[in-house]
Image (cartoon, helix red, strand yellow):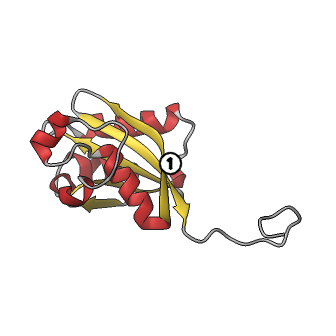
Amino acid sequence: MTLVVGVGASSRADVREIAGLVESVLARDDLRGEDVACLATAEARAGAGAVRDAADLLGFHLVAYPVGVLAQVAVPNPAEGVRARTGTASVAEAAALHGAHTLGGGARLLVEKRATARATAAVARIIPANPPVTDEPGAAGS
């Protein structure tokens, strides 16, 4: 599992909107659900509600991070309106990047945030901290 999907959502978002957005992002970018390690979001959205229900519906483990942690993540598309409402300028991109970094030691944003009326999603790839060493000709260190 090499992907983390970050999700941000308003309190008015429903499970169909969030799950549909995540499925759409994965399909549009030829990413596979079986490669998703987890859905990541802000703590305020991880309790009972649409984000948790969407994770359950999609079969993804849900992880949540404090907004103070998400606020420290550099993202390509910060939004001041989101910062005013939540305390962080990004939820989807920041959660995806932070989750991937936490799981692997490094992260690369594959899909910048995409939005519906009440939800956003972004995808980051987990970069292993210690890539496997091979003895194949042409491998690094040969």
Q: Is residue 91 above or below residue 138?
A: above
In the figure, 28 relative to 69: above or below? above
**Image x and y of residue 101, in percent:** 43, 61
Residue drawn 78% across the image and 70% down it = 141
Q: Residue furthest left?
A: 85
Image point 53% across, 57% down: which residue?
A: 2
Say which residue appears at 26% left-offset and 36% top-offset: 119
Work out whether 43 lies above or below 110.
below
- Residue 128 is left or right of residue 66, and the answer is right
Front residue of 62/99: it is: 99
Task: Decide if residue 107 is on the left or right side of residue 46.
Answer: right
Amino acid type at image mark 1? Gly
Residue 89 vs residue 1, the one in the foreground: 89
Whether residue 87 sits left or right of residue 59 in the image: it is: left
For residue 106, side relative to residue 14 (left or right): right
Outermost residue toward the right?
137
The quadrant of the picture occupied by the C terminus is bottom right
Q: Check disc 1: other Cα within 10 Å, few if <14, some if 14-19, many if 20+.
A: some
Residue closest to the far top: 117
Residue 48 sits in which quadrant? bottom left
The x and y percentages for residue 15 are 25, 41
The local secondary structure at tag 1 comes to: helix
In this figure, what is the number of numbered marks?
Answer: 1
Measured as percent of width and height from the top left, residue 30 is found at 57, 37
Closest to the observer, 76 or 92 = 76
Residue for badge 1: 33
- Which quarter of the figure is the N terminus placed in? bottom right
Please name whichever residue, 120 or 83, is drawn nearer the observer in this view of the structure. Answer: 83
- Which residue is located at x 39 percent, y 40 percent? 22
